Each structure stands twice: as structure tokens, then as C-alpha cells.
Amino acid sequence: MCGVCGLLSLDGSPVDAGVVEEMNQTLFHRGPDSGGAFVDGRVGIAARRLAIIDLAGGDQPISNEDGSVNVVQNGEIYNYRELRQELERRGHRFSTRSDTEVLVHLYEEYGPRFAERLRGMFAIAIWDDRRRRLVLARDPFGIKPLYYRVKDDSLSFASELKALLRQPGFSREIDLDALDAFLAFGFITAPLTIFREARKLAPGHLLVWDGMNGGRIRIEEYARPSAAPVDEIRDESEEVLAAELRERLRDSVRAHLIADVPVGVLLSGGIDSCMLTALAAEEGSGPVSTFTIGFDERHFDEREPARLVAERYGTNHHEIVLRPDAVELLPALAETYDEPFSDGSAIPTYLVSQLARQHVKVVLSGEGGDELFGGYNYYVGHRLAPIIAPGAAALRPLIELLPTSMAKSSTFDHRAKRFARSARLPTLERHLQWKTITPAEEREELILPERRGPNDLIDLLSTRFSGSSAFGAGLDPQRREEGFLDAAGGVAARRAEAADAGDPVSLEPPTSGFLPARSRRAPDRRASGRAG
């Protein structure tokens, strides 16, 4: 991984090059191979690099032929070779073999829409000196993080929150909306962060500051991964679809193996990582290195199936066992994640990554497989809900009488109760209820009640998934952009409630330090059309 950061003075005054350098040094662990910065008057962008492609010539920032466009990137562009060939035919000249240099020339051709042509995982910052324009872009799935802050006539951005904290005057005031989201989901979803002064750029979005257009900051969505509409669902045979899926997976793994350094695989013994190992072994130019973490508790230990796969495909296999003293890693994890993050796999992932780093620079993992292929039980619940929801609702009084097991949350009584309580809700609300960790009533006791309306998390998710066929029709584009510009997170919901009650509240956020939401009356939530 690499790290990027930068400062833009909104009032035209010179940025402090020392602050830019300090922010960049904070990201040293992300890119120990090299670091660089471009500072010119009102703007400064910088990067720390972990060299993967073009080890000798790919240091950042990278500029175009005349130095008028400069770019920094965290990530990798998998189709950079095809894009480079296209750009060379159009007359662009390249001085490196890196994927990052493709970005400046692609931007010259397409402007901010360059991101639509990319296949990869990335967080990108481009400074266009001629047009006085800053463009930030995040990949469609949000694999690479990108945070930003707008305050005191400056815009800053970074790959990690800790870099933003290096700015003088940064307030560490906790965002209670973000805390509520964390207690509900176990993580803080974009655009929120744990700090009120900082936001996450959402997946598939651009942030553009245009100095020649009044210095306006706008946030635009350029990509939205979603399921196919119902009328476009394929009806070929299972054999045909399976063959195509296999080739698509193979093509994806082949693209991820593009590197000038060895690439390994985190092999857990599950379907996802075993599939990746098999394809990487078949598509790679040499033996693949695989890395597995084991447990003394046999119920959790997957070393044996991982060994079978490693033996089958002749990998260079490495293992480590998680011991009880791993709790001592918690302070390091807290520093790594920057903000609250509740995931039981964080410690083993941290340890197996340390093991992998002793041998390779890049690893593939099976993250996201369950989301793409419906591997979780609640996907089955969504299919069943329209059919059996009426019966489940009628039987709910009896289901609630089932004795509660203390063994684990995946027992039948736990699932049955959660299903019966939420089966008749619209799809998005039902999904929220099934995924929620801390119930709403408990969160209300922990967080100031006046900070949150009853449906704010629904509004937040609607902003993210509006228009997705998975959750039905959603918000109009203006309200969607309003949601991303609203740093308080729950302002839109409280506006709607106040408007419904006839309360003439101000339509502007109550505090400074973030981008103001547009002045418009929020639509009546009861008629907003959150379809199931």
C-alpha cells in the first residue's frame, strides 16, 4: 500500500510546506520505499510509496510533459497497459513504466471523468495548475481509504486520519452520529468519521475544487456497483454461467497478479481463499506463497484444509498460530485503524499480514466474496421474507417465547426472533435491523438523545444505496449529494422531522468546519419512496 496527502488553500495564500511534509511522514509506514511532494503556492500534494510496479521509475508525485498536471496515487490500476497504449496513440509521451503516470495523461484527455475509465483499487489526487483544479477520486468499492477536511479556508486530504491530525487546530470533537453508526454496524460508514471535522470520500465518488468556477467544492458519484435489474437477469444454463464466472474470476486474479514484486495469498482454508490460491497458482509465473493463521481451539482452526490446498497447488506455505497474548496487540490495532472498528478477525488478520510481509509485498485475500455471492444467512432471509413474512408476523408472540440461548448469536432462537421482528419491514430497514449489533434503544441510552432522530441511519444508508436495485428506488440526486455534503450526518433527518411538525428550523448546519448542505426543504420521509 501507499499513502497520499495534501493541502489546498481556498483563499489563495501559500500552504505550509512543513505541514505537508509532516502529514506525509505520518504515512511512512504505508510507503517505506520512497516519498515525495509537490508544493506550489496554494497547493501541496505528497505521497509515500510502496513500490510494486516500475520499482526504479515510479516515484511520486508524477507530472505530465510540461509539469502542469501532477498526481499522487495509493493503489494499483489493473488496466494501465491498455490505457497507456490508447494514450500513446493519441500522442502522449511517457517517461516511466508505472501505472501512476497513466493517470495524468488520462486526466488530460477526459478531465475529472478519467476515473470512469479505470479498473483497479485507488485513492487519487490530481492538481491541474492551468485550470486551478484539485480532483480527488476513490475506487468504486472503496478498497482504498481517502479522508478530507474543509475548515479555516483550507481543504486537506489523506489516506489516514492520523495525517489530518497533524494540521494545527484540528479539533478532536467526537461525531456522535459516527459513534451511533459504529455501535450499530461495528464500523463507521462513509461519509462519516469519528471526528466531526473530517469526512470520508465515499466509494465511487469524486471531490472536485474548481478555482476557475468560483472555488466551489462539489462531490460527484461516477460509479455505483450494483446488482443487475430484474429484467436483465441472465437465463442461460447453469453450466454456461458457471463457465463464464470461472473465466471472470480467472481474469480478475490475473489482473491482480500484475506486479514487479512477488504476490502471495492469505489462505484461510475457506472457499474464497482456496479459489484464489488455485487460480493464482495456475496464472502465476512461479510458485505462490500462501499464509495461514491457526488457532489452538480446534473449532476455529483451519490449518488442515489450508495445508491440503497448499499441497495440491505446490505453494510456499507459511503458518502462524494465534496465542492468548495477542490481546497485547490492541493498542497497535487502535493506532492502525485510526477510528473505532469492531471486527473479530482484526487481530488474526494483523498477525498473518505481519507474517506475509516477511516474504512478499502484496497479498490477495478473499474479502468480499460473501457479499458478492450471497454467502450470509440474511441473504436467504431477504428471499424468504416476501413469502413468509405474514405468517412470521402472526407467529411472533409465540416465537418471542422461545428460550434464549447464550451459546452464540447464530442459534435458531436468535435467528427466528430477528426474522419475525423485521420480516415485514421494507428491504433496507429489514437489512439494517438484521445487521445491527447494538439495538437502537441501547444506543439512545449511550448517546445524547437529541443528537439523533429515529431514522437517521436509514437516511445514511439510503444516501449510499439510493437507486440500487438491491434496495429499490431511493433518493433523488440532489438529496443524495446533500447527504454527502452534510458532515453532521443526521441533519437531513432532523430537518424532515421538524418540517413535518411545522417547526421553522434553519436549513443550514449549526456549526462550521465542513461543507454546508444545500438550502432546500428535505422531502417528507413518509412519502420518500423507500421501496422494499
Image: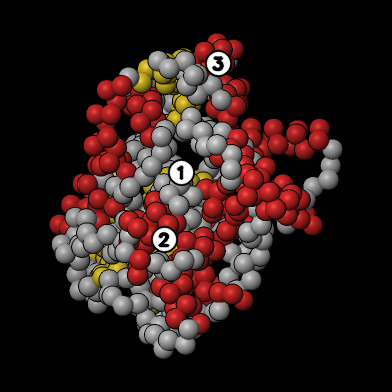
Q: State the residue position of label 1.
A: 76
Kindly identify the residue that appears in the image at 33 percent across and 51 percent down: 159
Give me the disc on residue 305. 3
The part of the image, by quadrant, that contains residue 528 is bottom right
Give me the disc on residue 339. none
Q: Mark 1 belongs to which amino acid?
A: Glu
Residue 137 higher or lower than 245, as above or below: below
Q: Mark 2 belongs to which amino acid?
A: Pro
Q: Nearer the viewer, mark 1 or mark 2?
A: 2
Q: Earlier in the sequence, mark 1 or mark 2?
A: 1
Q: Residues within 10 Å of mark 2 (few under 14, many from 20)?
A: many
> Tag 2's secondary structure?
loop
Residue in front for this viewpoint, 511 or 526:
526
Q: CA distance from mark 1 to mark 3?
A: 31 Å
> Tag 3's secondary structure?
helix
Image quarter of the C terminus: bottom right
